């Protein structure tokens, strides 16, 4: 009986580790509720935004992260993003900006369907996890000017 | 903004009836050469400093070497390699009875298998790059001149579709960067207009000469899309579309890029 429970727990582990996507509700151009039910961490969010392999943000955006040289300029400056948008608007812009702008170049960071020819290493994975997105949203919300 | 875009489309149609609607007007087209530092431009311009010329020289030696069961050299049929002037400017193109268009490297391999009775060289092998480089060098400064072959039209159109199709985990199309945002900065790099005029090209990042197919794979991997296998029809379609889009631009090969 106990052994059975342990085996069941072990079998369940991979599914838990595979970043189950949480359902979310879009209201207008916002996702009002946190994807995790908790507030993100702005310091962790800043590190994700700055990391060119994780957040990828600075490839296209310029942001107030002076230690990172060679920032992109083909997307809006992240400076002031928290003043321009509500937290809910920032969340939807990161999760799936195509919802309100079909021609946007912004990748859908939390979408795994309706994508073509995704490389095997990235198949069925969002670009960022729900926790990472909440951290990024928390950081962007601090960028008031 | 939309009036300007419509103007470009109209001008594109006037310039070439076969050019897909996305094609830019010739006046706005720009080689990535002009976005490089003066020292890299000088490296490309100087035959002694241009590392791609090492492949050209190797290719020149190979041109005269007898190969395969037929024991024939390229020169035995074609004469001097200078007779290849203008050939690279026309590729990809149909060749013989082959049912699909081929790019220049594939055309060279057809000569190997059909005429020299030798094995095809692998994609990106030193040998195939060298022969492609020496043949393309004979077209330096000549304008890209896709043949007026109606059989090519559906393949060019397929390439145009691929160019605008979103792909990969990042859900990007070629056009979103190389049409909509060319000239802007993607991190440190100025996004080029993606004209295929310097290939095979020496990239400092590669520390090697490489083909346009290799460069297309790089972009697909960056988009986190599954790259097509070397030699895939999709690459040839994209190469055809890019050639149609660059019609009239002078060949720089071997180009040098960071």
Image (tube, coloured by chain):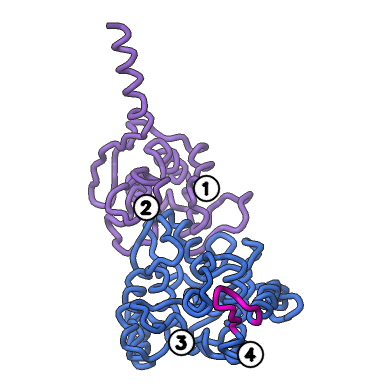
| Residue under pointer 2 | A118
Q: Which residue is mark 4?
A: B80
Subunit ID for the residue under disc 2: A
Quadrant showing the N terminus of chain B: bottom left
By secondary structure, the bulk of the magenta-drawn segment is best described as loop
Image: magenta residue range: B64-74
Left or right: B25 in relation to A102: right
Magenta-span inclusion, residue B124: no
Which residue carries the number 1 mark? A53
* Circles 2 and 4 on the same subunit: no
Secondary element under disc 3, as helix, strand or loop, is: loop
Percent x, y for residue B91? 46, 82
Chain A, chosen colour in render: purple
Left/right placement of residue B86 relative to residue B179 reads right
Residue B247 — which label?
A: 3
- Circle count: 4
Disc number placed over residue B254 in the picture, else none: none
* Discs 2 and 1 lie in a common subunit: yes
Check the image and report above or below for A56 versus B49: above
């Amino acid at each position: 009986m106990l052994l059975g429970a342990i085996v069941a727990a072990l079998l369940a582990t991979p599914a838990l580790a595979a970043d189950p996507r949480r359902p979310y509700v879009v209201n207008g151009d916002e996702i009002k509720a946190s994807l995790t039910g908790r507030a993100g961490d702005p310091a962790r969010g800043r590190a994700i935004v700055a990391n060119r392999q994780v957040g990828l943000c600075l490839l296209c955006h310029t942001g107030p992260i002076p230690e990172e040289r060679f920032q992109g300029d083909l997307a809006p400056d992240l400076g002031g993003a928290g003043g321009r948008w509500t937290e809910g608007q920032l969340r939807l812009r990161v999760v799936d900006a195509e919802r309100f702008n079909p021609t946007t170049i912004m990748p859908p960071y939390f979408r795994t369907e309706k994508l073509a020819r995704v490389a095997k290493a990235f198949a069925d994975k969002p670009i960022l996890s729900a926790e990472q997105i909440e951290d990024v949203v928390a950081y962007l919300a601090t960028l008031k000017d | 903004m939309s009036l300007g875009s419509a103007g470009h489309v109209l001008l594109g149609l006037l310039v070439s009836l076969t050019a897909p609607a996305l094609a830019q007007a010739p006046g706005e087209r720009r080689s990535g050469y002009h976005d490089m530092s003066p020292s890299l431009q000088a490296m490309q311009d100087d035959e002694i400093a241009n590392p791609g010329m090492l492949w050209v020289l190797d290719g020149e030696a190979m041109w005269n070497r007898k190969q395969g069961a037929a024991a024939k050299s390229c020169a035995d049929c074609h004469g001097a390699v200078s007779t290849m002037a203008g050939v690279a400017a026309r590729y990809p193109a149909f060749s013989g009875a082959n049912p699909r268009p081929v790019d220049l490297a594939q055309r060279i391999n057809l000569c190997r298998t059909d005429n020299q009775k030798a094995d095809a060289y692998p994609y990106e092998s030193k040998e195939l790059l060298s022969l492609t480089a020496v043949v393309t060098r004979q077209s330096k400064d000549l304008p890209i001149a896709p043949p007026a072959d109606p059989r090519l039209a559906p393949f060019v159109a397929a390439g145009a579709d691929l160019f605008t199709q979103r792909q990969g985990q990042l859900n990007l199309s070629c056009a979103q960067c190389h049409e909509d945002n060319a000239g802007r900065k993607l991190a440190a790099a100025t996004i080029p207009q993606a004209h295929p005029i310097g290939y095979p090209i020496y990239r400092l990042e590669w520390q090697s000469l490489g083909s346009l197919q290799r460069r297309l794979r790089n972009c697909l991997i960056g988009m986190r899309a599954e790259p097509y296998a070397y030699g895939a029809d999709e690459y040839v379609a994209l190469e055809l579309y890019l050639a149609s889009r660059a019609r009239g631009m002078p060949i720089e090969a071997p180009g040098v890029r960071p």
